[in-house]
Image (cartoon, helix red, strand yellow):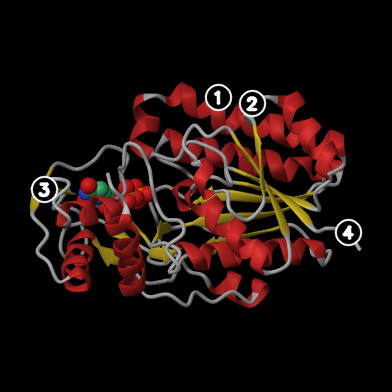
Amino acid sequence: MRDRKILVTGGAGYIGSHTCMVLKHRGFEPVVYDNLSNGHAAFVKWGLLEEGDIRDRSRIEEVLRKHQPEAVIHFAGLIEVSESVRDPLSFYEVNVAGSLSLLSACIAAGVDKFVFSSTCATYGIPRQLLIDEGHVQDPVNPYGRTKLLIERAILDLEVHGLRSVILRYFNAGGADPGGKIGEKHDPETHAIPLAIDTVLGRRELFRIFGNDYNTRDGTCVRDYIHVLDLADAHVRAVDYLLADNPSDQFNLGTGRGTTVGELVAAVEKATGRPLPKQEDQRRPGDVPQLVANNAKAQSVLGWQPVYELEDIIRTAWDWHRKQNT
Ligand code: UDP
């Protein structure tokens, strides 16, 4: 019997580390490939760490040949939309050139099952209320464009026998309820950790970016999904590929939209404390509303998100309260 290794690029990061935890619980052996630029060595608790950069083609191939994983889950990349607007070149270098180097190493090493961490930002401005996988992909920021380029490359590489599952996440949030790992970005830009840090008094104010969008309270609508629901979907995607199913793409969201205003109220309710806040300008690159139609992931992968917004905030709150900074 093989040892069921899965190579997880970016496995020391937020979603990657939670996925390693769930992989391990389901009998897989995660091997983390991460350069620790944004990841944390302390988050690698469920498998070994092979330090390396995805742009280092020969290092990845060496690691793939050494471990001969049954599949690769590819999280490594730059993720922050506004940074992608300021510094697009880094995004093309890491997300596009890095992913191509990884893909080429996979093909050379005979690894033919690939799960890709993509994003609802590949859709751009939604043309319907709930976004399904057939929605036109017309991203409005460099982050989304780099992810879309890789999606296309992955599909083209099927000619070399590469089978893939592309997972397009909506807004990840929350943390391991066991408290071992959580969300930790430096600098932090995401709404939930920023709001919690503000409640904790580590920041003065939570800024609400834009109050004049065409939404129910004028603030942006997002579909917040618990990181463990995302992790569960990745393990299902691996099982799906190991069962010889064809390449496919899935949206991962709850199907429920929350405005920034509603998020603020939910943070105050879940923490029992007031959130000092201030209305501010729109943030460049933001789209008004992003909510998933997740019917396909439910029917094909048998995936069903189980955590509510309240659980996302509560688990994030538990995690952030334990952190010193
Ligand atoms: N947001 C905000 N204040 C903040 C951070 C985020 O109002 O300090 C808003 C942001 O404009 C977006 C939503 O919260 O509408 C989620 O932003 P986040 O950065 O968490 O995720 P994104 O949707 O950009 O991937």
Q: Secondary structure at mark 3?
A: loop
Disc 1: which residue: 93
Q: Give the spatial CA distance, label 3 vs label 1.
A: 34 Å
Q: Reply above or below: 197 against 55.
A: below
Disc 4: which residue: 2
Q: Reply above or below: 181 against 84.
A: below
Disc 3: which residue: 205
149 relative to 79 in the view: left or right: right
Residue 305, given in percent of the width and then of the height, sits at 49, 74
Q: Give the spatial CA distance, label 1 vs label 4.
A: 35 Å
Residue 110, given in percent of the width and then of the height, sits at 87, 41
Q: Give the spatial CA distance, label 2 vs label 3.
A: 38 Å
Q: Give the spatial CA distance, label 4 vs label 3.
A: 52 Å
- Circle 4 packing at 10 Å, graded few (<14), some (14-19), many (20+), is few
Residue 55's mark? Answer: 2
Point 45% across, 40% down: residue: 79
Point 49% across, 41% down: residue: 40
Within 8 Å of ligand 1, the CB of disc 3?
no
24 relative to 241 in the view: left or right: left
Contact? badges 1 and 2 (CB < 8 Å): yes
Residue 175, given in percent of the width and then of the height, sits at 42, 62
Nearer the camera: disc 4 or disc 2: 4
Disc 1 or 2, which lies upstream in sequence?
A: 2
Q: Quadrant of the N terminus?
A: bottom right
